Amino acid sequence: FTFTALIRRASTWEDAKWALEEMKRAEVLPDVVTFTTLIHRASTWEGAIWALEEMKHAEVLPDVFTFNTLIHRASTWEDAIWALEEMKRAEVLPDVVTFSTLWKMAKSHEDFYQCLHRLRGAWVSNWVNPDGINEAISEIQKAIIDLWANDFPQAQELANSYFQAFAPKRSHLSYQEFYLLTLLVRHQLHECYRLFETSGHQLKEIFKPIWYALMKLMGEEGHREFLRMGPELQETVDEIVDSVMRLRERYPS
Protein backbone atom coordinates (compact mmCIF):
# COMPACT_ATOMS: atom_id res chain seq x y z
CA PHE A 1 0.00 0.00 0.00
CA THR A 2 1.31 3.45 -0.92
CA PHE A 3 -0.22 6.90 -1.19
CA THR A 4 0.71 6.97 -4.87
CA ALA A 5 -1.30 3.79 -5.40
CA LEU A 6 -4.19 5.42 -3.54
CA ILE A 7 -4.04 8.41 -5.90
CA ARG A 8 -3.94 6.07 -8.89
CA ARG A 9 -7.04 4.20 -7.67
CA ALA A 10 -9.01 7.31 -6.71
CA SER A 11 -12.48 7.31 -8.25
CA THR A 12 -12.68 11.12 -8.43
CA TRP A 13 -10.30 14.05 -8.71
CA GLU A 14 -11.31 15.21 -5.24
CA ASP A 15 -10.36 11.78 -3.85
CA ALA A 16 -6.95 12.03 -5.54
CA LYS A 17 -6.33 15.46 -4.01
CA TRP A 18 -7.47 14.14 -0.61
CA ALA A 19 -4.90 11.32 -0.88
CA LEU A 20 -2.14 13.88 -1.50
CA GLU A 21 -3.21 15.86 1.58
CA GLU A 22 -3.22 12.65 3.65
CA MET A 23 0.28 11.97 2.39
CA LYS A 24 1.41 15.39 3.63
CA ARG A 25 -0.23 14.85 7.02
CA ALA A 26 1.56 11.53 7.35
CA GLU A 27 4.81 13.35 6.54
CA VAL A 28 5.47 11.04 3.58
CA LEU A 29 7.39 12.86 0.88
CA PRO A 30 5.78 12.67 -2.58
CA ASP A 31 8.07 11.91 -5.52
CA VAL A 32 7.95 12.40 -9.29
CA VAL A 33 5.75 9.31 -9.72
CA THR A 34 3.26 10.67 -7.18
CA PHE A 35 2.82 13.98 -9.00
CA THR A 36 2.83 12.44 -12.48
CA THR A 37 0.05 10.11 -11.30
CA LEU A 38 -1.82 13.10 -9.88
CA ILE A 39 -1.58 14.94 -13.21
CA HIS A 40 -2.89 11.83 -14.95
CA ARG A 41 -5.86 11.67 -12.56
CA ALA A 42 -6.77 15.35 -13.07
CA SER A 43 -10.26 15.72 -14.51
CA THR A 44 -9.50 19.12 -16.10
CA TRP A 45 -6.54 21.03 -17.52
CA GLU A 46 -6.77 23.40 -14.56
CA GLY A 47 -6.43 20.42 -12.26
CA ALA A 48 -3.34 19.23 -14.11
CA ILE A 49 -1.76 22.68 -13.77
CA TRP A 50 -2.60 22.70 -10.06
CA ALA A 51 -0.79 19.35 -9.68
CA LEU A 52 2.25 20.74 -11.54
CA GLU A 53 2.33 23.78 -9.22
CA GLU A 54 2.11 21.48 -6.19
CA MET A 55 5.06 19.58 -7.62
CA LYS A 56 7.10 22.80 -7.88
CA HIS A 57 6.21 23.80 -4.31
CA ALA A 58 7.38 20.37 -3.11
CA GLU A 59 10.65 20.93 -5.04
CA VAL A 60 10.23 17.67 -6.93
CA LEU A 61 11.78 17.74 -10.39
CA PRO A 62 9.52 16.62 -13.27
CA ASP A 63 10.72 14.14 -15.89
CA VAL A 64 9.73 13.31 -19.46
CA PHE A 65 6.84 11.13 -18.25
CA THR A 66 5.48 14.05 -16.21
CA PHE A 67 5.43 16.38 -19.22
CA ASN A 68 4.10 13.76 -21.62
CA THR A 69 1.23 13.21 -19.19
CA LEU A 70 0.67 16.96 -18.91
CA ILE A 71 0.60 17.40 -22.70
CA HIS A 72 -1.85 14.52 -22.98
CA ARG A 73 -4.15 16.30 -20.49
CA ALA A 74 -4.08 19.56 -22.50
CA SER A 75 -7.53 20.66 -23.62
CA THR A 76 -6.30 22.89 -26.48
CA TRP A 77 -3.32 23.10 -28.83
CA GLU A 78 -2.23 26.29 -27.06
CA ASP A 79 -2.22 24.42 -23.74
CA ALA A 80 -0.09 21.67 -25.27
CA ILE A 81 2.44 24.21 -26.59
CA TRP A 82 2.55 25.88 -23.17
CA ALA A 83 3.31 22.49 -21.59
CA LEU A 84 6.05 21.88 -24.16
CA GLU A 85 7.65 25.23 -23.37
CA GLU A 86 7.48 24.39 -19.66
CA MET A 87 9.31 21.19 -20.56
CA LYS A 88 12.00 23.22 -22.29
CA ARG A 89 12.34 25.58 -19.33
CA ALA A 90 12.77 22.56 -17.05
CA GLU A 91 15.52 21.30 -19.41
CA VAL A 92 13.76 17.97 -19.86
CA LEU A 93 14.33 16.39 -23.28
CA PRO A 94 11.20 15.18 -25.10
CA ASP A 95 10.98 11.68 -26.57
CA VAL A 96 9.04 9.82 -29.25
CA VAL A 97 5.89 9.86 -27.09
CA THR A 98 6.06 13.66 -26.83
CA PHE A 99 6.28 13.94 -30.61
CA SER A 100 3.44 11.46 -31.24
CA THR A 101 1.13 13.11 -28.69
CA LEU A 102 1.67 16.58 -30.17
CA TRP A 103 1.33 15.19 -33.69
CA LYS A 104 -2.11 13.77 -32.86
CA MET A 105 -3.21 17.03 -31.22
CA ALA A 106 -2.16 19.35 -34.05
CA LYS A 107 -5.11 20.42 -36.18
CA SER A 108 -2.93 20.94 -39.25
CA HIS A 109 0.59 20.65 -40.64
CA GLU A 110 0.93 24.38 -40.05
CA ASP A 111 0.29 23.92 -36.33
CA PHE A 112 3.15 21.49 -36.15
CA TYR A 113 5.46 23.72 -38.21
CA GLN A 114 4.75 26.46 -35.67
CA CYS A 115 5.72 24.08 -32.90
CA LEU A 116 8.99 23.09 -34.58
CA HIS A 117 9.85 26.68 -35.46
CA ARG A 118 9.37 28.00 -31.95
CA LEU A 119 11.51 25.27 -30.43
CA ARG A 120 14.20 24.83 -33.06
CA GLY A 121 17.79 24.60 -31.87
CA ALA A 122 19.97 22.14 -30.03
CA TRP A 123 17.09 21.07 -27.78
CA VAL A 124 14.90 20.19 -30.75
CA SER A 125 17.72 18.37 -32.55
CA ASN A 126 17.85 15.90 -29.65
CA TRP A 127 14.07 15.52 -29.51
CA VAL A 128 13.51 11.91 -30.53
CA ASN A 129 15.42 8.97 -29.13
CA PRO A 130 16.26 6.63 -32.07
CA ASP A 131 15.75 3.70 -29.69
CA GLY A 132 12.23 4.87 -28.90
CA ILE A 133 9.00 2.94 -28.68
CA ASN A 134 8.69 2.40 -32.42
CA GLU A 135 12.05 2.55 -34.16
CA ALA A 136 10.58 3.12 -37.64
CA ILE A 137 8.34 6.00 -36.59
CA SER A 138 11.11 7.43 -34.43
CA GLU A 139 13.50 7.48 -37.39
CA ILE A 140 11.19 9.48 -39.66
CA GLN A 141 10.27 11.82 -36.78
CA LYS A 142 13.94 12.54 -36.17
CA ALA A 143 14.44 13.17 -39.90
CA ILE A 144 11.60 15.74 -39.86
CA ILE A 145 13.13 17.53 -36.87
CA ASP A 146 16.63 17.56 -38.36
CA LEU A 147 15.25 18.83 -41.65
CA TRP A 148 13.40 21.68 -39.91
CA ALA A 149 16.59 22.55 -38.01
CA ASN A 150 18.44 22.76 -41.37
CA ASP A 151 20.61 19.75 -40.57
CA PHE A 152 20.14 18.46 -44.10
CA PRO A 153 22.88 15.76 -44.16
CA GLN A 154 21.54 14.13 -40.99
CA ALA A 155 17.95 14.33 -42.22
CA GLN A 156 18.93 12.83 -45.57
CA GLU A 157 20.77 9.94 -43.92
CA LEU A 158 17.80 9.06 -41.72
CA ALA A 159 15.28 9.47 -44.55
CA ASN A 160 17.34 7.34 -46.92
CA SER A 161 17.42 4.53 -44.39
CA TYR A 162 13.72 4.88 -43.63
CA PHE A 163 12.37 5.12 -47.18
CA GLN A 164 14.51 2.21 -48.39
CA ALA A 165 13.58 -0.07 -45.53
CA PHE A 166 9.87 0.63 -45.12
CA ALA A 167 7.19 0.54 -47.77
CA PRO A 168 4.48 3.17 -47.18
CA LYS A 169 1.73 1.85 -44.95
CA ARG A 170 -1.30 3.38 -43.33
CA SER A 171 0.27 3.94 -39.89
CA HIS A 172 3.23 5.81 -41.41
CA LEU A 173 1.65 7.75 -44.28
CA SER A 174 1.08 11.02 -42.45
CA TYR A 175 4.73 11.13 -41.31
CA GLN A 176 5.99 10.35 -44.81
CA GLU A 177 3.74 12.99 -46.33
CA PHE A 178 4.90 15.54 -43.76
CA TYR A 179 8.56 14.80 -44.49
CA LEU A 180 8.08 15.25 -48.24
CA LEU A 181 6.17 18.50 -47.70
CA THR A 182 8.86 19.76 -45.33
CA LEU A 183 11.46 19.14 -48.05
CA LEU A 184 9.45 21.49 -50.28
CA VAL A 185 9.13 24.12 -47.54
CA ARG A 186 12.87 23.93 -46.83
CA HIS A 187 13.73 24.41 -50.55
CA GLN A 188 15.12 20.86 -50.80
CA LEU A 189 13.49 20.21 -54.17
CA HIS A 190 16.20 18.02 -55.66
CA GLU A 191 16.36 15.87 -52.51
CA CYS A 192 12.59 15.42 -52.70
CA TYR A 193 12.91 14.49 -56.38
CA ARG A 194 15.64 11.97 -55.56
CA LEU A 195 13.47 10.26 -52.94
CA PHE A 196 10.58 9.96 -55.38
CA GLU A 197 12.88 8.50 -58.03
CA THR A 198 14.88 6.08 -55.90
CA SER A 199 12.65 4.81 -53.09
CA GLY A 200 11.31 1.81 -55.01
CA HIS A 201 7.95 2.01 -53.22
CA GLN A 202 5.81 3.80 -55.84
CA LEU A 203 5.91 7.11 -54.00
CA LYS A 204 4.79 8.93 -57.14
CA GLU A 205 1.54 7.02 -57.13
CA ILE A 206 0.95 7.15 -53.38
CA PHE A 207 1.78 10.85 -53.03
CA LYS A 208 0.75 11.96 -56.51
CA PRO A 209 -0.38 15.51 -55.54
CA ILE A 210 2.95 16.16 -53.79
CA TRP A 211 4.83 14.83 -56.82
CA TYR A 212 3.08 17.25 -59.17
CA ALA A 213 3.44 20.11 -56.66
CA LEU A 214 7.17 19.37 -56.75
CA MET A 215 7.15 19.46 -60.55
CA LYS A 216 5.41 22.85 -60.49
CA LEU A 217 7.87 24.24 -57.94
CA MET A 218 10.82 23.01 -60.02
CA GLY A 219 9.77 25.32 -62.86
CA GLU A 220 11.36 24.51 -66.22
CA GLU A 221 12.95 21.35 -64.87
CA GLY A 222 9.59 19.86 -64.00
CA HIS A 223 7.42 21.52 -66.66
CA ARG A 224 7.18 18.56 -69.05
CA GLU A 225 6.21 16.14 -66.26
CA PHE A 226 3.78 18.70 -64.79
CA LEU A 227 1.88 18.80 -68.10
CA ARG A 228 1.03 15.10 -67.62
CA MET A 229 -1.02 15.87 -64.51
CA GLY A 230 -4.72 15.05 -64.71
CA PRO A 231 -7.13 18.00 -64.34
CA GLU A 232 -8.71 16.37 -61.27
CA LEU A 233 -5.49 17.07 -59.34
CA GLN A 234 -5.21 20.76 -60.24
CA GLU A 235 -6.99 22.18 -57.20
CA THR A 236 -5.17 19.94 -54.71
CA VAL A 237 -1.76 20.64 -56.25
CA ASP A 238 -2.43 24.39 -56.26
CA GLU A 239 -3.36 24.23 -52.58
CA ILE A 240 -0.12 22.40 -51.76
CA VAL A 241 1.98 24.93 -53.68
CA ASP A 242 0.19 27.87 -52.05
CA SER A 243 0.71 26.31 -48.61
CA VAL A 244 4.43 25.71 -49.30
CA MET A 245 4.94 29.31 -50.44
CA ARG A 246 3.08 30.67 -47.42
CA LEU A 247 5.12 28.53 -45.02
CA ARG A 248 8.39 29.51 -46.69
CA GLU A 249 7.55 33.15 -46.10
CA ARG A 250 6.40 32.64 -42.53
CA TYR A 251 9.25 30.32 -41.49
CA PRO A 252 12.35 31.21 -43.53
CA SER A 253 15.28 28.79 -43.36
Image (cartoon, grey):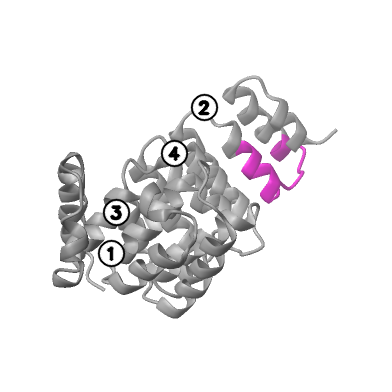
Q: Are marks 1 and 3 in contact (CB under 8 Å)?
A: yes
Between 9 and 222, the one lying in front of the other is 222
The number of callouts visible is: 4
Helix, strand or loop at label 1? It is helix
Q: Quadrant of residue 62?
A: bottom right
- For the magenta stretch, what is the residue range? 23-38
Q: Is residue 79 left or right of residue 169?
A: left
Tell me which amino acid carries mark 3: Ile
C-alpha gap between disc 1 and disc 3: 9 Å
C-alpha gap between disc 4 and disc 1: 31 Å
Camera-side mark, 4 or 1: 1
Tell me which amino acid carries mark 2: Ser
**Residue that badge 3 annotates:** 210
Instruction: Examine the rendered structure and indicate whether residue 107 appears above or below residue 186.
Output: above
C-alpha gap between disc 2 and disc 3: 41 Å
Tell me which amino acid carries mark 4: Ala
**Residue that badge 4 annotates:** 74
Q: Is residue 95 visible?
A: no
Instruction: Examine the rendered structure and indicate whether residue 5 appears above or below residue 204.
Output: above
Between 163 and 32, the one lying in front of the other is 163
**Residue that badge 1 annotates:** 184
Camera-side mark, 2 or 1: 1
Q: Residue 253: image x %, image y %?
A: 26, 74
Tell me which amino acid carries mark 1: Leu
Between 177 and 92, the one lying in front of the other is 177
